[in-house]
Image (cartoon, rainbow, N blue to C red):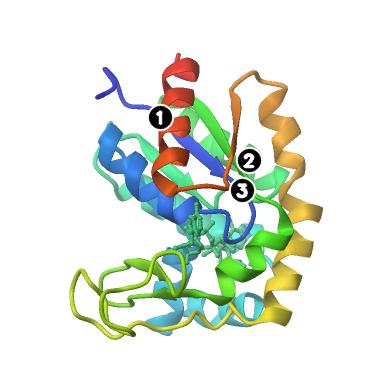
């Protein structure tokens, strides 16, 4: 199904909840841009830009990068992107201050958060997902050693690149990311629920089945 006009979608959920996996499907199905602040920050770290150098320590510890730094990065991206394209915001906002900033940035462009989708996954499932995740630095494809293994161990099915484990997918860092999520990001559920544009989807089961739930929620909430 194609939407008749551009929409902006916020994808909420815990670390390892499947936001990246589902964001790729949503962007393809609804012709939207994928804007992942985690991916953008990892690019900055890889290129050793001043932002990347500042962000790296926070990310390695599983803490949030300060709102101001992420906000500037997002602002740059939104202003440089193709006019009129809607986005799937994956991993942004993560604090109430970030949600307010996003509202302001979108309003400047005559847009708004149309839909907030929450993928709910219990903590006990997340640890197994994240310790088993492998990703391709070359093309961004994501695998799981048990749930979604590549055809050849350690090699990306899509581009043949060598798969890696993310530096913050260590058990102690995952536990900190979960703590930070519950403390700082979970309050956003109430924020979007009170606006009447939040849909909650259970994020356990096959990625295809979860995507169908998300697609249905998009149809219900899009105004
Ligand atoms: P970020 O990269 O956004 O990480 P995250 O939110 O912790 O989320 P993940 O990317 O780990 O998981 P995901 O939900 O995308 O799951 P995925 O689809 O990969 O952020 C990293 C860091 O950057 C943060 O800690 C922070 O420091 C910083 N940062 C980023 N944004 C920020 C912001 N706005 N403000 C401040 N700091 C910020 O799936 C996980 C695994 O599970 C994969 O292996 C996948 O194959 C598998 N899987 C997916 N779906 C299923 C399923 N249904 N069943 C079984 N397995 C599944």
**Gap in Å between the C-alphas at discs 3 and 2?**
15 Å
Task: Please give the name of the residue rendered at 40% of the width and 82% of the height, measured from the top-left corner.
Answer: 46
Disc sitting over residue 99 in the figure: 2
Residue farthest along the left direction in this orientation: 159
Which sits earlier in the primary sequence, circle 1 or circle 2?
Answer: 2
Please report whichever mark, 1 or 3, sits nearer to the chain's N-terminal start: 3
Can you tell which mark lies on residue 215? 1
Identify the secondary structure beneath mark 3: loop
In the image: residue 74, left or right of residue 131: left
Label 3 CB sits under 8 Å from any ligand 1 atom: yes
Residue at 69% in and 25% down: 193
As measured in the structure, the alpha-carbon distance from the residue carrying label 1 to the one carrying label 3 is: 16 Å
**Can you tell which mark lies on residue 13?**
3
Secondary structure of residue under mark 2: helix
- Using the image as rendered, state which of residue 47 and residue 175 is in the foreground: 175
Question: Residue 111, position in %: x, y?
Answer: 43, 26
């Amino acid at each position: 199904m194609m939407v008749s006009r551009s929409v902006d979608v916020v994808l909420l959920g815990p670390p390892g909840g499947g936001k990246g996996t589902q964001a790729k499907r949503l962007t393809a199905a609804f012709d939207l841009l994928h804007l992942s602040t985690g991916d953008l920050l990892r690019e900055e770290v890889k290129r050793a830009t001043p932002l990347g150098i500042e962000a790296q320590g926070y990310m390695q510890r599983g803490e949030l990068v300060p709102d101001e730094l992420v906000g500037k990065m997002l602002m740059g991206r939104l202003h440089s992107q193709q006019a009129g394209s809607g986005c799937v915001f994956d991993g942004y906002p993560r604090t109430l201050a970030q949600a307010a900033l996003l509202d302001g940035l979108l309003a400047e462009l005559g847009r708004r958060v149309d839909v907030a989708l929450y993928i709910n996954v219990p903590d006990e499932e997340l640890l197994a997902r994240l310790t088993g995740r492998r990703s391709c630095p070359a093309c961004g494809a994501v695998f799981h050693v048990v749930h979604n293994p590549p055809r050849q161990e350690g090699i990306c099915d899509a581009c043949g690149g060598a798969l890696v484990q993310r530096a913050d997918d260590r058990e102690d860092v995952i536990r900190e990311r979960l703590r930070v999520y519950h403390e700082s990001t979970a309050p956003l559920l109430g924020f979007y629920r009170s606006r009447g544009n939040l849909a909650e989807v259970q994020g356990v089961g096959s990625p295809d089945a979860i995507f169908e739930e998300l697609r249905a929620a998009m149809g219900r909430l899009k105004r």
